[in-house]
Image (cartoon, helix red, strand yellow):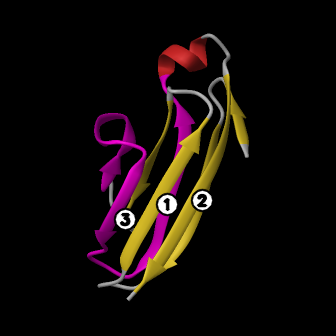
Amino acid sequence: ASIRGDQSKLYVVNVRAGQKLTVKLTPSNASNYFNITAPGAQQALFIGSTESNSYTGVVPSSGDYKIDVFLMRNAARRNETSNFTLFVGAKN
């Protein structure tokens, strides 16, 4: 997929409590990251811009986890583009 400027892509994955969730982003732009938000949460469970472009962890609750892929503000203001591949997996 790809994004430009202040666009973002939202992906939703349904995961059961106790499953291991793996998310890996391979972007063409170094300012391209993702956040993960647990169901019903106000704050992100994972913040890619401060942690990395890879997450693996056991999810605390069942439901729809939101994965928001975006460009950081510096790249968005310059209307840059990023092509990316997003891998999402969940297993017991």
Residues under labels 3 and 2: Cα distance?
12 Å
Magenta stretch: give its range. 43-72
Magenta-colored stretch includes residue 3: no
Left or right: 43 as drawn, with respect to 32? left
For the question of whether residue 44 can be seen, the reply is no
Q: Position of residue 13 (x, y in %)?
A: 54, 71
Mark 1 or mark 3, earlier in chain: 3
Q: Secondary structure at mark 2?
A: strand
Q: Position of residue 89 (x, y in %)?
A: 51, 72
Left or right: 25 as drawn, with respect to 43? right
Q: Secondary structure at mark 3?
A: loop
Instruction: Tell me the quarter of the picture where residue 62 sits.
Output: bottom left
Q: Residues within 10 Å of mark 3 (few under 14, many from 20)?
A: many
Amino acid at dot 1: Lys
Q: Which residue is mark 1?
A: 66
Q: Which residue is mark 2?
A: 11
Dots 3 and 2: beta carbons under 8 Å?
Answer: no
Circle on res. 38: 3
Q: How many marks?
A: 3
Q: Position of residue 63 (x, y in %)?
A: 44, 78
Amino acid at dot 2: Tyr
Residue ID at (62%, 10%) = 78
Residue lying furthest right in this view?
A: 1
Q: Position of residue 55 (x, y in %)?
A: 37, 57
Mark 2 or mark 1, earlier in chain: 2
Dots 2 and 1: beta carbons under 8 Å?
Answer: yes
Left or right: 64 as drawn, with respect to 6? left
